[in-house]
Image (cartoon, helix red, strand yellow):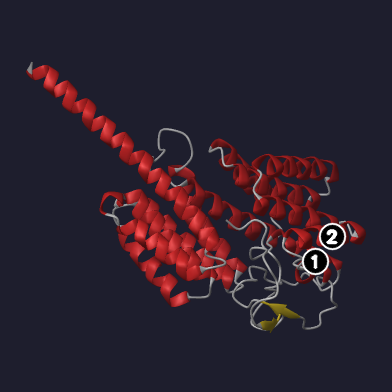
Amino acid sequence: MRARRLVLGLFAFLVLACGAARAAQDDVALIDDLVRQGDEAPDSAIRAIGELSNREFAVTPLVRRASLTGIGIVQARNGRVAEALAQVAALTEFGRTEPLADADAHLVRAEIEVNGGHMASSYQQARAALAVYSEACAPGPRHDAACNYRDWWRALDMAQRGAADQGNAVIANGYAQTLLDVARRNGDRPREAISLGVAALQAEANADSASANRLIAQAQHVARADGSAWVQVRVAVLGGLLHFRRQQPEAVQRLRIGVGLRLGGTDPLDAMIHRADAGGEEQPFRRRQRHRRVEHHGGGDGPGVVEHFLYPVALIRHAGEGAELAGRKGGGHRHLAQPRRL
């Protein structure tokens, strides 16, 4: 009888543990959505993430880390550097006992740097994060169940852009492939679609147009299957960047009109593509806190500037809001829409 009670007690414990684990994963997925929404409404996103992390039953190491990281990323992307650094400090302290939290701290630092137009520093921080993520998140004996693959994907994304920016094609290719592998392994269709688009751009940079065509077609197929309008728009923009690299203005114009219709008649690609080879003149770009992530590292002001579209910036949305800033003031191009940021 006593043995039966022990077995029943153990079974109940396992059921509760599994339920808590599922709840934690659900919370982390919700935090991921809120981070993306933070590009548009940072205050409400930060508040919602904070409410998730303050629930008594949700205080697990995974949710706590995801909350600190998510809030830090939203703050970093919106130029709230001092606030984001506070999350970095909290994650660093947490990292004394939890190595993944230290990686998360480097990830938030990478977001701060890329928002400031410091691509080399962002690349350095992303690689520091990957030193932990690549071991703790990859399948194998050292895999840590508390890994949040989404943050691994974000670090890979920034590292891929950093490697491409420095002309390290082999390293950039490796990051692009791992980016896709992580998305597929975790059944994340939006990230899979965007990763395929990134791989297409990288293939084109490697003068492999056939592979680029195949990869962008796969990205479009996955985006349509996912059905989310925002995913389809981001993949469409990646396709537009591919056309622009090939100097195919008619295709870019068709895309510009199509995306504008999807977003309520706005013209979101004007700042991203149409003005890209404006001859080095200062151009007015909207949304000082929304359009960022491109640093101009001596690539020239002619068609060659398309190399820097491997790191396009903020989320596409309606273009009629916000103050204007001359794109070449304050450090780098901040006008490109970001079809890959998640």
Position of residue 66 measured from the top left corner of the image (x, y, whole percent): 41, 54
Identity, as a three-letter code, of the amino acid under mark 1:
Ile
Instruction: Provide the residue designation for mark 2.
Output: 244
What residue lies at 81% left-to-right and 83% top-to-bottom?
A: 281
- The answer to which of 44 and 221 lies nearer the viewer is 44
* Neighbour tally class for label 1: few under 14, some 14-19, many 20 plus, Cα within 10 Å: many
Identity, as a three-letter code, of the amino acid under mark 2:
Phe
**Residue 273 - label:** 1
Looking at the image, residue 281 sits to the left or right of residue 70; the answer is: right
Above or below, 29 relative to 122: above
- The answer to which of 210 and 140 lies nearer the viewer is 210
Q: Earlier in the sequence, mark 1 or mark 2?
A: 2
Position of residue 300 measured from the top left corner of the image (x, y, whole percent): 81, 72
Q: Mark 1 touching mark 2, by CB under 8 A?
A: yes
Q: CA distance from mark 1 to mark 2?
A: 7 Å
Looking at the image, residue 134 sits to the left or right of residue 9; the answer is: right
What residue lies at 46% left-to-right and 51% top-to-bottom?
A: 30
